[in-house]
Image: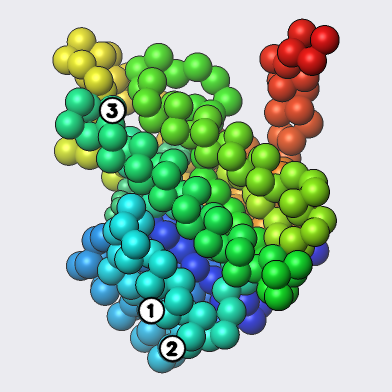
Amino acid sequence: MHEIQDKVCFVTGAAAGIGAVIVRAFLDEGARHVAALDIDTSNGQALQQDLTNKYGEGKVRFHKCDVTTNEIDAVYDNVVNDFGYIDVVVNCAGIMNDRPNAYVKEIEINVTALIRSSFKAFELMRKDHGGRGGTIINISSIVGLFQAHLLPVYTATKSAVLQFSNCLGMDPHASRSGVRVLTLCFGCTDTSLFSLSKMGAFDKETDELLVGSLGKLPMQKIESAVAGLLTAYREGASASTWLVTSDRPAEDITGNISKAYGIMSQGVFS
Ligand SMILES: NC(=O)c1ccc[n+]([C@@H]2O[C@H](COP(=O)([O-])OP(=O)(O)OC[C@H]3O[C@@H](n4cnc5c(N)ncnc54)[C@H](O)[C@@H]3O)[C@@H](O)[C@H]2O)c1
């Protein structure tokens, strides 16, 4: 059983939505410190102020950081300088916008930056390179588990997160590094990710279908998503995948993923 108590934590996309509630939950669980990274300065600073009032000086710090730039390396170095180590990294920053002027950025944020941050964390934490182990939690989605025609690029990014995180979390990497890599697949969760100003489809026709589908999606509470993430953190083995949807308790679906890849890889090695 893993505990957040006394851990130094690092959360991207932390100023709003699911990320901000993860920061609050980690402090509630007794984290030593939480570094909260986001591009959204006004929400980030407000979160820092609110949580400093509640938990005291030094428990949380907002870092203005675009995860697609090398600003993130500077924040890693900063946190290690100040606190000596980072035990838990949650790569939560993400956007859902397949529009022609946004999809390259979507891939950069959801995939490239997540991989870059994961490798930075893995190198820092790995026991075989002088670290003391740790946990990387990467945020995928239910769209990594089915074929969602409305958002082909977003769906591809979350499938990439699932494969990358599962493969990095497998042996021999896990046993020689002591680093756990967990994947969370959240169902629709009530955040501004779905606001019309933030999301978009790759063409006008699909945009209409996407907007039309919105009212029909069952949304879970952010707190349910974060409660599921805490369960995965406490109980999850490296390379495990967790489904947290419809306000239900977190479900370890690692066996389903293995079965699915067992089917998909039929004929590959024969
Ligand atoms: N809300 C859902 O239904 C849902 C479902 C499955 C997965 N997810 C995933 O959960 C994560 C959080 O989503 P959310 O619903 O809380 O969305 P959100 O829009 O409320 O929060 C995302 C946060 O990421 C930040 N961000 C965006 N680009 C960034 C960048 N370049 N650098 C740093 N920060 C950046 C935003 O400023 C924002 O604060 C995302 O990865 C999303 O894909 C969400």
Is residue 26 shown above or below 180? below
Please tell me which residue is depicted at 60% across the width and 34% down the height of the picture: 163
Residue 109 locus on image (x, y percent): 36, 46
Rendered-image quadrant of the N terminus: bottom right
**Which of disc 3 and disc 1 is earlier in sequence?**
1
**Which of disc 3 and disc 2 is earlier in sequence?**
2
Type of amino acid under label 2: Gly
Task: Tell me, yes or no, if residue 187 can be seen here.
Answer: no
Number of disc labels: 3
* Residue of label 1: 61
Give the side of residue 28 with respect to residue 178, left or right: left
Helix, strand or loop at mark 3: loop
Rendered-image quadrant of the C terminus: top right
Residue 197 locus on image (x, y percent): 17, 38
The quadrant holding residue 133 is bottom right
Task: Tell me, yes or no, if residue 82 can be seen here.
Answer: yes
Please tell me which residue is depicted at 41% across the width and 91% down the height of the picture: 57
| Distance Cα–Cα, label 1 vs label 3 | 32 Å
Ligand 1 within 8 A of label 3's CB?
A: no
| Distance Cα–Cα, label 2 vs label 3 | 38 Å
Type of amino acid under label 3: Asp
Residue 58: which numbered mark, if any? Answer: 2
Report the front residue among 98 and 46. 98
User: Looking at the image, do the residues carrying marks 2 and 1 touch, with CB atoms under 8 Å apart?
Assistant: yes
